[in-house]
Amino acid sequence: MIRPCIAILVSIDISYYDMSIDMDTVTLSPKFQVVIPQAIREALRLAPGEKFRVMRYGDRVELIPVKKIKDLRGFARGMDTTIQRDRDRV
């Protein structure tokens, strides 16, 4: 018998290096699926069908949204590009 997957949502808001970390607890389904909580989906503006890179980082799993090159245009605007270069690299 397959039971429906029920996510247990426990929200923890931690301030870390001037960044807010929103933590929720979800359950892995029998098909190895997880549901990203609504608050996180909305905060990151995730859309259905969006692709992710899946990485094992130590003993955890990280999902990194894949961005189109077009969407990355201007992401470094305002960045200081003045660096000291070697003479043979100018």
Image (tube, helix red, strand yellow):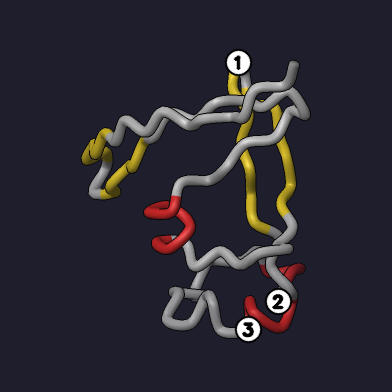
Q: Look at the picture and state if 61 lies above or below 65.
A: above
Q: For residue 80, what is the image quadrant?
A: bottom left
* Tag in front: 1 or 2: 1
Q: For residue 86, what is the image quadrant?
A: bottom right
Q: Look at the picture and state if 81 lies above or below 51.
A: below
> Label 2 sits on what residue type?
Val
- In the shown orientation, is residue 57 left or right of residue 78? right
Q: Work out how far the residue at label 2 is from the one at label 3, CA to CA, in angstroms.
A: 25 Å
* Tag in front: 1 or 3: 1
Q: Work out how far the residue at label 1 is from the one at label 2, CA to CA, in angstroms.
A: 43 Å
Q: Are marks 1 and 3 in contact (CB under 8 Å)?
A: no
Q: Position of residue 48 (x, y in %)?
A: 66, 64
Q: Work out how far the residue at label 1 is from the one at label 3, CA to CA, in angstroms.
A: 33 Å
Q: Secondary structure at mark 3?
A: loop
Residue assigned mark 1: 59
First in sequence: mark 1 vs mark 3: 1
First in sequence: mark 2 vs mark 3: 3
Q: Which mark is residue 73?
A: 3
- In the shown orientation, is residue 50 left or right of residue 79? right
Q: Which mark is residue 47?
A: none
Rendered residue at 76%/68% (across/down): 88
Q: Secondary structure at mark 2?
A: loop
Of 25 and 86, nearer the camera is: 25
Rendered residue at 40%/61% (across/down): 43
Mark 2 crowd level (few <14, some 14–19, many ≥20, 10 Å Cα): few
